[in-house]
Image (tube, rainbow, N blue to C red):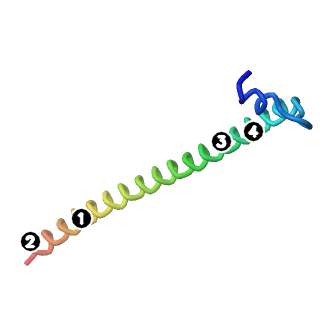
C-alpha cells in the first residue's frame, strides 16, 4: 500500500460522500465564471464594433465636408 492511500482513502472522520457533492457545485461555479467572461468579451467586442463604425462615419463625413468645401471655394474663385 502506498503512502498516498491514506490521503486518498481518508482518515478518521472522513466522509466519502463529500466529493460527489462538491464537484457539481464547482462545475456550476466554473460554468458561471466562464459565462461571465464570455459576456464581458461579447460586450467589449460589440462596443469596439460600434466605436469602429463611428470612426469610419466621422472620417467619411470629414472627407465629404472637405470635398464640398473645395467645390465651394472653386465656385467663389470662378466668379471673381
User: Which of marks 2 and 3 precedes in the sequence?
Assistant: 3
Residue receiving disc 3: 35
Provide the secondary structure element on which disc 1 rests. Answer: helix
Disc 3 to disc 2, how far (Cα)? 64 Å
In the rendering, at what x and y percent does residue 27 appear? 73, 35
Q: Earlier in the sequence, mark 4 or mark 3?
A: 4
Quarter containing the C terminus = bottom left
The answer for how far apart the CA atoms under marks 1 and 3 are is 49 Å
Residue 68: mark in rendering: 1
User: Residue 78's mark?
Assistant: 2
Badge 1 or badge 3: first in the primary sequence: 3
Residue 72, given in percent of the width and then of the height, sits at 19, 69
Image coords of residue 34 (percent x, y): 64, 41
Other-residue count near label 3 (Cα within 10 Å), few / some / many at <14 / 14–19 / ≥20? few
Q: Nearer the viewer, mark 2 or mark 4?
A: 4
**Rendered image: mark on residue 10:** none
Left or right of 39 on screen, residue 29: right
On screen, residue 5 above or below 78: above
Q: Mark 4: few, some, or many residues within 10 Å (few <14, many ≥20)?
A: few
Assign a secondary structure to mark 2. Answer: helix
Q: Quadrant of residue 78?
A: bottom left
* Between marks 3 and 2 in the image, the one whose residue lies nearer the viewer: 3
Decide if residue 53 is on the left or right side of residue 29: left
Of 45 and 3, nearer the camera is 3
Residue drawn 81% across the image and 32% down it: 19
**Looking at the image, is mark 2 or mark 1 earlier in the sequence?**
1
In this figure, which residue is indicated by the disc labeled 4?
A: 26
Between tags 4 and 3, which lies in front?
4
Q: In 3D space, how far apart are the residues under numbered discs 1 and 4 (Cα atoms)? A: 63 Å
Furthest-right residue in this view: 13
**Of the two numbered discs 1 and 4 in the rendering, the one whose residue sits closer to the viewer:** 4
Amino acid at each position: 500500500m502506498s503512502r498516498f492511500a491514506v490521503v486518498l482513502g481518508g482518515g478518521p472522520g472522513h466522509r466519502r460522500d463529500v466529493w460527489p457533492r462538491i464537484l457539481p457545485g464547482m462545475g456550476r461555479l466554473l460554468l458561471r465564471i466562464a459565462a461571465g467572461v464570455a459576456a464581458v468579451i461579447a460586450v467589449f467586442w460589440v462596443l469596439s464594433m460600434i466605436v469602429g463604425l463611428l470612426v469610419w462615419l466621422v472620417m467619411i463625413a470629414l472627407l465629404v465636408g472637405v470635398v464640398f468645401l473645395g467645390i465651394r471655394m472653386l465656385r467663389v474663385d470662378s466668379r471673381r
